[in-house]
């Protein structure tokens, strides 16, 4: 992914889900860290009152990406402030069960990623997000997350459910990998604790796919 011009708005990815435990923060910190490894000035803006991404940053110490907290109402100003400090890649980590926060994040984003486990209750929680992204007309993609090994039928049914709501699907799925949980608890990412592992490979594939989508927006 090419570095953006510092005079333009930073590329902004919103990670949105109305379901708690969907993997929003894990996805946010992994993408922002991968962006930093690609020489972006990357930042996670944590608008979740639980501030899980900020806690991860505390465990991580003085290593990129930068994580800042912001109330949803000040998200736009926080992005502007990040841009003034040279940030060119922003990932917004949002709270569950908060339409107003999700709406602000979607409005600020170039692309919305909606992590969801391939289970009935999680898929049901996609409905309000589908309405929000449809209204905002921001490109949005469901990222199936914590997919059990060998769950091809479950994955197929989940994709069908998302499509029935009018949502597009990211072709990269994330498995139920211990590396995601182990790394987060250490303030690291899956690629940092196991560079050759499947979790690292999935994030790399997701990063490459995301880069192509963002580049198309610039075309």
Image (spheres, grey):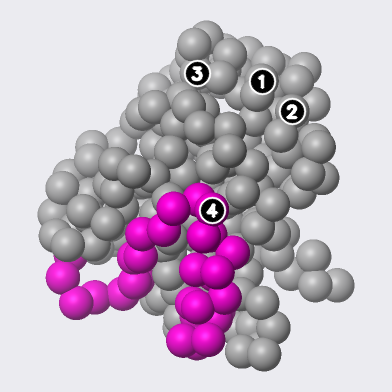
Q: Which residue is rendered at x = 71% and y = 34% of the image? A: 132
Q: Which residue is rendered at x = 70% and y = 64% of the image? A: 214
Q: Which quadrant would the N terminus be assigned to in this image?
A: bottom right
Crowd rating for badge 2 (residues with CA inside 10 Å; few <14, some 14–19, many 20+): some
Residue at the far top in the pictured view: 120
Q: Which residue is mark 1?
A: 127
Q: Earlier in the sequence, mark 4 or mark 3?
A: 4
The kind of secondary structure element at disc 2 is helix
Would you say residue 181 sits in the magenta stretch? Answer: no
Horizontal relation, residue 82 to residue 48: left or right: right
Crowd rating for badge 1 (residues with CA inside 10 Å; few <14, some 14–19, many 20+): some
Q: Nearer the viewer, residue 190 or 219?
A: 219
**Which label sits in the foreground, 2 or 4?**
4
Mark 1 vs 2: CB contact within 8 A: yes
Mark 4 vs 3: CB contact within 8 A: no
Q: Earlier in the sequence, mark 3 or mark 2?
A: 3
Q: Earlier in the sequence, mark 1 or mark 4?
A: 4
Q: Nearer the viewer, residue 67 or 204?
A: 67
Q: Earlier in the sequence, mark 2 or mark 4?
A: 4
Note whether 1 is above or below 113 in the view shown: below
Task: Work out whether residue 93 can be spotted.
Answer: no
The kind of secondary structure element at disc 4 is helix
The kind of secondary structure element at disc 1 is helix
Q: Which residue is mark 4?
A: 73
Q: Which residues are magenta?
A: 60-88
**Which label sits in the foreground, 3 or 2?**
2
Q: Which residue is mark 2?
A: 131
Q: Which residue is mark 3?
A: 122
């Amino acid at each position: 992914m090419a570095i953006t011009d510092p005079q333009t708005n930073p590329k902004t990815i919103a990670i949105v889900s109305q379901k708690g435990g969907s993997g929003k923060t894990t996805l946010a910190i992994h993408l922002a860290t991968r962006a930093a490894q690609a020489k972006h000035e990357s930042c996670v803006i944590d608008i979740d009152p639980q501030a899980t991404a900020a806690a991860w940053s505390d465990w991580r110490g003085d290593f990129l990406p930068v994580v800042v907290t912001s109330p949803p109402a000040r998200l736009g100003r926080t992005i502007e402030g990040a841009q003034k400090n040279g940030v060119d890649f922003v990932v917004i980590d949002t709270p569950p069960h908060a339409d107003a926060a999700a709406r602000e994040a979607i409005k600020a984003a170039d692309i919305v990623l909606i992590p969801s486990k391939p289970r009935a209750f999680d898929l049901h929680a996609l409905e309000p997000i589908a309405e929000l992204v449809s209204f905002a007309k921001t490109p949005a993609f469901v990222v199936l997350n914590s997919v059990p090994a060998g769950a091809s039928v479950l994955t197929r049914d989940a994709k069908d459910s998302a499509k029935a709501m009018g949502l597009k699907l990211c072709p990269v799925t994330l498995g139920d990998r211990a590396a995601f949980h182990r790394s987060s608890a250490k303030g690291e990412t899956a690629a940092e604790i196991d560079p050759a592992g499947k979790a690292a490979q999935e994030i790399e594939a997701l990063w490459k796919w995301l880069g192509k989508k963002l580049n198309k927006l610039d075309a």
